[in-house]
Image (cartoon, helix red, strand yellow):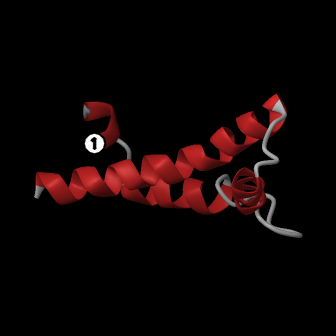
Amino acid sequence: MAWLDGIPLWIAVVAALTLGLAPFVPEPHIWEKLKMLAQGTLTRPIDIFDLLFHAAPWVLLALKLVRMATRG
């Protein structure tokens, strides 16, 4: 997991807040796709890819924070 240690925390935070939430208006894509997933309407491949694309920075940030917490 050396690649994860090499990513500065501020880059992970900026990525999550920009790419993870873009576009901001009318609502963040990640929120829209999560609502679709909860409703069971997330069926088109482009929507699934979009969810994965916008969730990736949040997953990276979470992994980075867990790694930092467990390494002491």
Estimate how packed mark 1 is, as few (under 14), some (14 to 19) or many (20 or more) residues with alpha carbons within 10 Å: few
Q: Residue at x 76, y 63 (%)?
A: 28
Provide the residue designation for mark 1.
Answer: 5
Residue 71 x %, y %: 13, 52
Q: Where 70 sits versus 28, above or below?
A: above
Image side of residue 47 versus residue 19, left or right: right
Residue 63 x %, y %: 36, 48
Query: Which quadrant of the figure contains the N terminus?
Result: top left
Query: Which quadrant of the figure contains the C terminus?
Result: bottom left
Residue 35 x %, y %: 74, 60
- Residue 44: name its quadrant: top right
**Badge count:** 1
- Residue 47: name its quadrant: top right
Badge 1 element: helix
Q: Residue at x 80, y 29 (%)?
A: 45
Q: Nearer the viewer, residue 13 or 50?
A: 50
Q: Residue at x 47, y 53 (%)?
A: 12
Residue at the right extreme of this rendering? 26
- Residue 30: name its quadrant: bottom right
Residue at the top extreme of this rendering? 45
Residue at the left extreme of this rendering? 72
Image side of residue 55 versus residue 65, left or right: right
Q: Where 40 sits versus 28, above or below?
A: above
Residue at the bottom extreme of this rendering? 26
Three-letter amino acid code at the position of disc 1: Asp
Q: Residue at x 81, y 59 (%)?
A: 23
